[in-house]
Structure formats: structure tokens, C-alpha cells
Image (cartoon, rainbow, N blue to C red):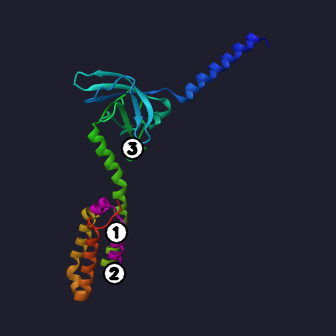
Amino acid sequence: MKQPVKIILMGFIASALFLSCGYFLGSDLKLRILFDETKQLQVGAKVDYAHCDQTVGRVKNVSLCENGKTAVDLIIFSQFKGLVRSGVMFVVDYPLFSKDPTRILMDILSKDIDNPQIKSGATLNGVSWIFYKMAVAADSISPVADTVVGHSKILLNELESFVKSDDFDRLLEALEKQAKIISGYTIEQRRRFERDILPKIEKKIKNHYKRLNTIYNQEEIKKLEKELNELKHSLNINTPAKQ
């Protein structure tokens, strides 16, 4: 095969490979985000993914809308567009104590990880920095809340068993066990338990208090009251807790 023909053929193959790579990678994701304020955001500013500070896109245009909002046109690079799902938050991040340029932070909360992907060309509302911090805080507390509820279901089930079987020793044991579990709770978990779970426990016992008085003597009732007080004492946020 002659040299010019080889060059042409190699060029054709290279072009085909380039086009096929572009096909499989797909095009960039184009979005328009409406912000109340952009704090001197510039064209070319980075779009960073909050969880790993990875740059996933760039700002392509910034313009003022008739309603007073600022429209920010941005692209998310093709290899990262799978991250952009329903519920995604975009927030303008401007440095207070440095000369770093203003950027946009993109974040996906854990509850939104499995949401549908957003299609190119969509218009979304950006969020304020305060709203973003509140949403992230709530997202981080959710697993803590679930842990508290999960542990507490065990105790509430023990209470149900006690009500049905009058197994007094089993109830005392369950209360004591829960107090030990609480000793390992964070302050936020203790507050959650005190707010959402303890009232249910006290209500269940109070509803059966008259029946308890007819079945058990005063000494046994005092044991129950003692275990309840120990449980409450373990919730004291001034006692040692995991931070």
C-alpha cells in the first residue's frame, strides 16, 4: 500500500475513533439556573461538586432577567452529567476571607441520589447559601434520626410484649438496656429520643398504671419508676455523650 494511502486511511480511522468516543461519552449537559443574587459570578467560573470539590462544569453566560433574577447558563461536562438528578441544588459560593473567584457549588443530597436524571436544557431555581446549609444539615441528621427510631422500636416492642404478657422483669430489663444504648448517643440523638420516643414510652406505661397497681406491689412499682428515672437521667445532655 502506498504511503499517501496509508496516511489517508489512518486519518480516517482516527476520525472514526474520535467520533465514536464522542458518541459514547455523549454531549455536555446544558442548564439554566435562576438566582436571586450571584455575587459577581463571572463567565468561565467553575461549577464544583460539593462532596469532593471536583470541577464538573463551567459557567457559560450570566444575564439579568425581567423578574429581577439572574440567569446563569452553565454546562456540566459529559462525564459528570449523571450526577445531576432531580432535587439537585446549585448555590453561589463566594469567598469571604480570600481572593478566590466566586464559583457555583452543585450538591446532591443522599435522599436524591436515586432520583431521575435532569435533561439538558432544563431551567432550575438556585438556592441561597443559608438554605443550602440548612438542607445539608438536615440531610446529615436524617441517618441519626433513623438510628434513634430503629433502636427505640426495640424498646417499644418490649413494652407491647409487657402489656400483653405482664412480664414485669422483661420490662425492667428493656428499660435498663435502652438507658445503656442512650449512653452512646450523640447529643442530637438524645434530643431526638427525648422528643419523639420518651413521650410514647411514658404514655404506654401511664395507660396501664392502674392495672399495674392491682397486679404488683408498691415495691415493684417503685422499681419501674426508678428505671424510668434512670432512662430520663441518661438523656441529660450535660452527661457525657459522643460528639
Calculate the distance from the C-alpha at mark 2 to the C-alpha at mark 3: 43 Å
**Contact (CB < 8 A) between labels 1 and 2?**
no
Calculate the distance from the C-alpha at mark 1 to the C-alpha at mark 2: 29 Å
- Looking at the rendered image, the quarter that the C terminus falls into is bottom left
Drawn side of residue 179 relative to residue 207, left or right: right
* Label 1: element kind: loop
Which residue range is magenta in the image?
Answer: 170-192
* Label 2: element kind: helix
Task: State the residue at coordinates (37%, 35%).
Answer: 105
Q: Which residue is mark 2?
A: 165
Verify whether residue 175 appears in magenta: yes
Is tag 1's residue or tag 2's residue first in the polypeptide sequence? 2
Q: Can you give x and y, in whole percent of width and height, for residue 223 in the image?
A: 27, 83
Does any portion of residue 120 appear in the rendered image? Answer: no
Q: Amino acid at mark 2?
A: Ser
Q: Quadrant of residue 158?
A: bottom left
**Contact (CB < 8 A) between labels 3 and 1?**
no
Calculate the distance from the C-alpha at mark 3 to the C-alpha at mark 1: 32 Å
Is tag 3's residue or tag 1's residue first in the polypeptide sequence? 3
204 vs 220: above or below: above
Q: In this orientation, which residue lies closer to the viewer: 130 or 123?
A: 130
Q: Which residue is mark 1?
A: 183
> Dot 3 surroundings within 10 Å: few (below 14), some, or many (20 or more)?
some
> Dot 1 surroundings within 10 Å: few (below 14), some, or many (20 or more)?
some
Q: Can you give x and y, in whole percent of width and height, for residue 95 in the image?
A: 32, 34
Does any portion of residue 145 appear in the rendered image? Answer: yes
Drawn side of residue 82 relative to residue 146, left or right: right
> Dot 2 surroundings within 10 Å: few (below 14), some, or many (20 or more)?
few
54 vs 150: above or below: above
Disc marking residue 234: none
Disc marking residue 112: 3
Verify whether residue 186 appears in magenta: yes
